[in-house]
Image (cartoon, helix red, strand yellow):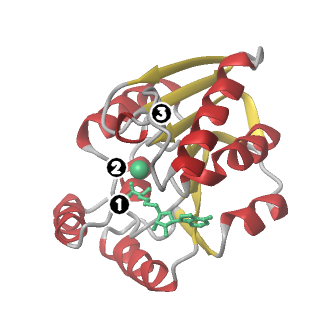
Amino acid sequence: MNKIELAKIKQKALEAHIPIIMDDTLAVIKEELTKSKPSKILEIGTAVGYSAICFTEFLTDGGSIDTIEREADRVIEARENIIKAEVQDKINIIEGDAVEILPTLPGEYDVVFIDASKGKYPFFLKESLRMLAPKGIIFADNVLYKGYVLSDYNKHKQRTAVRNLREFLSELQSNEMLETKVLEVGDGLAIAKKKN
Ligand code: SAH
Ligand code: MG
C-alpha cells in the first residue's frame, strides 16, 4: 500500500467533510485485525475508500474486501483512490444501496464493518449475521451517535436513527452467539465477536 497517497486521501476527505473513520476508532479496529488476520472483509459504507484502504494491510495473502457505496460520485472517487493507494487488487467496490445489495451476497466474511445509514443498522445486522464466518467479528461505527443513543434524548429530527441504533445495540447484546462490547471511542464503536 502507498502510505503517502493514503495520507493525501485522508486529508482531502477531511477537508470535504466526508465522515471517514476517526483515528481512535481505527486504532481499536487495527488492533483487533492484527490478532484476527481476516481473509474476507465486508464493509457497508465505502465513502471514498479510506477505511477499506486502511484495512488492506491486515488481510491474509490473497484476502479481499467487498465494500458497498450508494453515492455514484463517491464510488468514482473511491475507485480512483484505491488505484492511487495501489490496493485495487484487494478491494471490490460494489455500487448500490446496501439494503438491496446485501441479500444478493453469499458470504462468508471474517469481518464485517457497518458504517452507513444508522436507521438501517438492524437490517445490516441481520444480513451480517447470515454471512459471518465462525469466530467472525462485526464492527459497527457511530453506534452512540453523538451521545443521543445513551441519553433520554428523543425529540430530535434524527429520532428514527436513534431508535434503530438502540434496537441494533440491544439485539447485539442479547444475541447469545456473540460477545459484544460497546466502546466510547470516536462516535461509538460496537465490537461483536461470534463465539464459534
Ligand atoms: N467507511 C468510510 C466512511 C463511510 S461514511 C470510511 O471510514 O472511510 C458512510 C457512507 O455510507 C456514505 O458515503 C454514504 O453514502 C454511504 N451509505 C449510507 N447508507 C448507505 C446504504 N444504505 N447503502 C450504501 N451506502 C450507504
Ligand atoms: Mg463512521
For label 2, count other residues whose C-alpha is less than 10 Å away and answer few (under 14), some (14-19) or many (20+): some
Mark 2: is the Cβ under 8 angstroms from ligand 1? yes
Residue at 78% x, 42% y is 126
Quadrant where the image shows the C terminus: top right
Q: Is residue 114 visible?
A: no
Residue at 65% x, 19% y is 173
Q: Which residue is mark 1?
A: 50
Based on the displayed image, in which of its 4 quarters is residue 47 positioned?
bottom left
Three-letter amino acid code at the position of disc 2: Ile
Q: Earlier in the sequence, mark 2 or mark 1?
A: 2
Mark 1: is the Cβ under 8 angstroms from ligand 1? yes
Instruction: Measuring from the top left, give residue 189's x and y in whole percent.
Output: 44, 33
| Front: mark 2 or 1 | 2
- Work out whether 60 lies above or below 151: below
Three-letter amino acid code at the position of disc 1: Tyr
Q: Which residue is mark 2?
A: 21
Asked if marks 2 and 1 touch (Cβ < 8 Å), the reply is: yes
Based on the displayed image, in which of its 4 quarters is residue 108 positioned?
top right
Q: Earlier in the sequence, mark 3 or mark 2?
A: 2
Lateral position of residue 62 relative to residue 195, left or right: left
Q: Earlier in the sequence, mark 1 or mark 3?
A: 1
Q: Which residue is mark 3?
A: 149
- Choose between 196 and 20: the one closer to the eye: 20
- Work out whether 107 lies above or below 26: below
Residue at 50% x, 40% y is 154
- Give the Cα distance between marks 1 and 3: 26 Å
Based on the displayed image, in which of its 4 quarters is residue 144 positioned?
top left
Three-letter amino acid code at the position of disc 3: Val
Asked if marks 1 and 3 touch (Cβ < 8 Å), the reply is: no
